[in-house]
Amino acid sequence: MSETFVLVHGAWHGGWAWQPVAARLRAAGHRVLAPTSPGLAVDDDPRDVTLADCVDALVAYAERLDLSDVTVVAHSWGGYVIGGAERRLAKRLKQVVFYSAFVPQAGESLTDTVEPELRAAFDELSRASDNNTVSLPFELFASDFMQDANESAARMAHGLLRPQPYRTFMDAPTADMTPTGVDVPSAYVLAAEDRSLAPGEYGWVPRFPERLGVPVIRTPGSHESLFTRPEELSRTLLDLVNSG
């Protein structure tokens, strides 16, 4: 049976980042859509983009295409985007998969959820920019986000990243911009070698899957396993929709 997937990218990325996974899902007979959030396309002006802008754009995208029975897969910061849109799109959704992703709760911005040292680094990077954005340093990307790739591959991927509008990290969602109480099945997939967040209090698990009340499903690879292990990630996603 053919499924419809909407793949929501993480910070600094765009819909393009899903291409290795999307190609495999399409080869398996499924419809795959991968929009890019405002401020992150090549010609976008990121200066005044808010988290609400990104949420509104995803809702408008689904409504414009009149999507239904959709499986949304959200990576990393993309959890804030689908978390904000889920209540408004609930009737169109079959399942939401948070993949190494933040699960938002009311009053808590992304910068509130990361370790203080990382927040301080983001603050410094945004002040150093001329448009209130944060660029991801290559050294951090290579060591903690895509450490399972060689330097050439990491530099190629990093070269495609865009500065992230900092408002989208700083804006705290309101209660209606969280998945709490929304009647849509959820799953939490964790890249097993993900070290983009420090383990422990500020790690991906157990806090984010606990917010959903679901177990953790592990898939091989780093935070950027959508690049480095797309075959395994695609298989994990297909197993989820086939078991639903």
Image (spheres, rainbow, N blue to C red):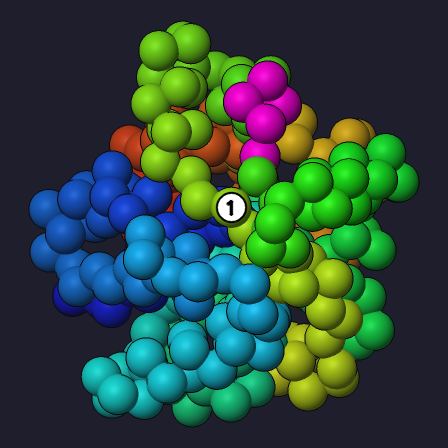
Is the residue 14 above or below the residue 94 in the image? above
Dot 1 lies on which element? loop
**For the stretch drawn in magenta, what is the main secondary structure?**
helix
Q: Residue at x 42, y 39 (%)?
A: 161
Q: Residue 231 is drawn in which quadrant?
A: top left
Q: Is residue 72 left or right of residue 167?
A: left
Residue 225, image x and y in percent? 43, 31
Name the residue that disc number 1 marks.
163
- Specify whether residue 142 is painted magenta: no
Name the quadrant of the C terminus. bottom left
- Point 83% across, 55% down: residue: 112
Residue drawn at point x = 79 percent, y = 75 percent? 106
Mark yes or no: residue 151 visible. yes
Front-most of residues 215 and 161: 161
Mark 1 nearby-residue class (10 Å; few <14, some 14–19, many ≥20):
some
Q: Quadrant of residue 200?
A: top right
Residue 184, given in percent of the width and then of the height, sits at 53, 78
Q: Amino acid at mark 1?
A: Pro
Magenta part of the chain: 136-140
Please state, as top left, top right, bottom left or bottom right, where the N terminus lies in the image. Answer: bottom left
Q: In the displayed structure, does residue 231 sit left or right of residue 221?
A: left
Q: Quadrant of residue 89?
A: bottom left
Seen from the viewer's position, the closer of residues 227 and 180 is 227
Residue 42 point in image, percent of width and height: 32, 52
Q: Residue at x 42, y 56 (%)?
A: 40
Return the residue nearer the eye: 67 or 47.
Answer: 47
Q: Please state the total of marks drawn on the protein image.
A: 1
181 or 59: nearer the viewer: 59
Is there any visible trace of residue 194 in the rendered image?
no
